Image (cartoon, rainbow, N blue to C red):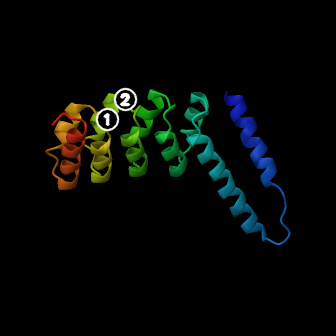
Amino acid sequence: MIRKFFQILSQIKRKLNVKDMSASKSNQNLDKTNSFSLAKCRLASNPGTSRDVLNKLAEKPQTEVLERIAENRHTSSETLEKLADKNISEVRSALADNAHTPTQVIETLASDENPDVRYILAENPNTPKEILDKLTVDDNPYVSFRAQRTLRRMGIC
């Protein structure tokens, strides 16, 4: 699978090597970089992408790619746990919204310093009741209200 990943990336690189005589060299390089990043984001968000490829993509420090990996429901638990350690709130927010995020990661996210991460977690109906109960008394009133509302919506409260 990893070989397939590198074959796809090589094909993308070859396609991006087409010279555009109307563009400057720096614009060409920027376009190649942007196209390559976009291709990696699409690969990371594709539900058909294998776990091996997602694990390999997660080794690169591109926020957009990491965020797409955190959103992908086929990402392995191990990779999701590694992503939780990233100091990137967008990635942690995506983890909070992923129904397949491991419980120990959810427990960590419930105490996240960023209220947006806690809010998304409070909004997620897949968040365990114990965590939602904890979030109902969050210091941030928006997080607290959202957790209460999610519990009501689930018919628990």
SS label for mark 1: helix
Q: Measuring from the top left, give residue 64's x and y in whole percent.
A: 53, 51
Q: Residue at x 72, y 68 (%)?
A: 27
Q: Is residue 16 visible from the viewing direction of this image?
A: yes
Q: Quadrant of the C terminus?
A: top left
Q: Give the residue type that dot 1 points to.
A: Ile
Q: Measuring from the top left, give residue 100's x and y in whole percent.
A: 41, 31
Name the mark on residue 45.
none
In this rendering, position of residue 44 left or right of residue 137: right
Nearest to the observer: residue 72 or residue 16: 72
Mark 1: few/some/many CA within 10 Å (<14, 14-19, 20+):
many
Q: Measuring from the top left, give residue 92's x and y in whole percent.
A: 38, 45
Query: Which residue is disc 1 drawn over?
Result: 106
Vertical arrangement, residue 40 with respect to residue 74, above or below: below
Q: Residue at x 22, y 32 (%)?
A: 129
Q: Quadrant of the N terminus?
A: top right
Whole-Å distance between the Cαs marked 1 and 2?
6 Å
Query: Which residue is disc 2 drawn over?
Result: 102
Nearest to the observer: residue 42 or residue 1: 42
